[in-house]
Each structure stands twice: as structure tokens, then as C-alpha cells.
Image (cartoon, rainbow, N blue to C red):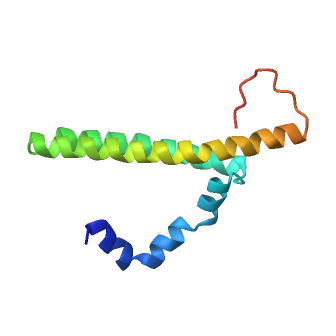
């Protein structure tokens, strides 16, 4: 069994709590309040910036090239996973926002909508 599978079994209740959280479910269904998404996105932006600085420091102090390469790849993989998650769920959120805008009959006229 893989390390990931072992961890999911060992911490199954925690995994369930995280993956069945109202925020995650609402984002997936496209019903998440745009203000909640905005706050999440801003907090995540701060986290990612700090993560990049931390990883860059760790890479610069790595004892060898193999360790530095591992840290570089780990950072890239985590960011790719986050981008995929956001892209999949952002589509539903945009649909919700567009439906809200249309329901109150606000003309967009080609302007950028910032939420």
C-alpha cells in the first residue's frame, strides 16, 4: 500500500472532514458566496507568496543538487495541483456570479468584473 493510502486510512475522519467541508462543497457546486471566495483567494495568495520565499530559502541552503531539485519539484507540483483545483471550481463560481448579475439585471457591457 502507498504512503498516501496509509495516511488516508489512518486519518480517514480528518480527510472526510476536509473533503466534505461546506466551503469545498459549495465551491464545487458553484454556490459559494463570492465574498467568501475572494477572502479565500486573498489568503491563499499570501500563503503562496510565503511558501515560495520559504522554499527558495530551503533550496539555497540545500546540502546538494538532488535535495534542491526535490524542493523545486515539490513546489511546482503543489502549485499545479492548486491551479487545477481552482480552475475546476472557478468555472462554477463564475457561473453563479453571472447568474446573480443577470438576475439583478446589471449590464456588464464588456467591463471586467472583479469580485
Determine the residue located farthest toward the top in the rendered image: 110
Q: Give the image location of residue 27, x and y in percent.
A: 63, 54
Q: Is residue 92 left or right of residue 11?
A: right
Task: Please state which of residues 40 and 95 is positioned toward the viewer in this rendering.
Answer: 95
Determine the residue located farthest toward the front in the rendered image: 1
Task: Please state which of residues 114 and 93 is positioned toward the viewer in this rendering.
Answer: 93
Residue drawn 18% across the image and 41% down it? 69
Q: Is residue 94 left or right of residue 90?
A: right
Residue drawn 47% across the image and 42% down it? 83
Choose top left, top right, bottom left or bottom right for residue 106: top right
Above or below residue 17? Residue 26 is above
Q: Is residue 64 left or right of residue 105?
A: left
Q: Give the image location of residue 2, x and y in percent.
A: 26, 68
Residue drawn 75% across the image and 46% down it? 96
Q: How many numbered discs sit on the rendered protein?
A: 0
Q: Give the image location of residue 9, x and y in percent.
A: 37, 77
Determine the residue located farthest toward the left in the rendered image: 64
Residue drawn 28% across the image and 47% down it? 74
Quadrant location of the C terminus?
top right
Quadrant location of the N terminus?
bottom left
Q: Is residue 75 left or right of residue 12?
A: left
Q: Give the image location of residue 65, x and y in percent.
A: 11, 39
Amino acid at each position: 500500500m502507498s504512503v498516501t493510502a496509509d495516511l488516508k486510512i489512518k486519518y480517514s475522519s480528518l480527510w472526510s472532514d476536509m473533503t466534505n467541508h461546506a466551503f469545498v462543497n459549495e465551491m464545487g457546486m458553484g454556490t459559494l458566496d463570492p465574498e467568501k471566495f475572494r477572502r479565500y483567494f486573498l489568503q491563499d495568495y499570501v500563503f503562496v507568496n510565503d511558501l515560495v520565499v520559504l522554499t527558495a530559502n530551503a533550496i539555497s541552503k540545500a546540502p546538494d543538487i538532488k535535495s534542491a531539485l526535490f524542493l523545486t519539484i515539490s513546489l511546482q507540483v503543489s502549485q499545479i495541483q492548486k491551479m487545477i483545483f481552482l480552475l475546476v471550481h472557478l468555472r462554477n463560481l463564475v457561473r453563479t456570479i453571472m447568474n446573480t448579475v443577470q438576475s439583478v439585471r446589471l449590464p456588464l457591457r464588456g467591463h471586467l468584473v472583479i469580485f
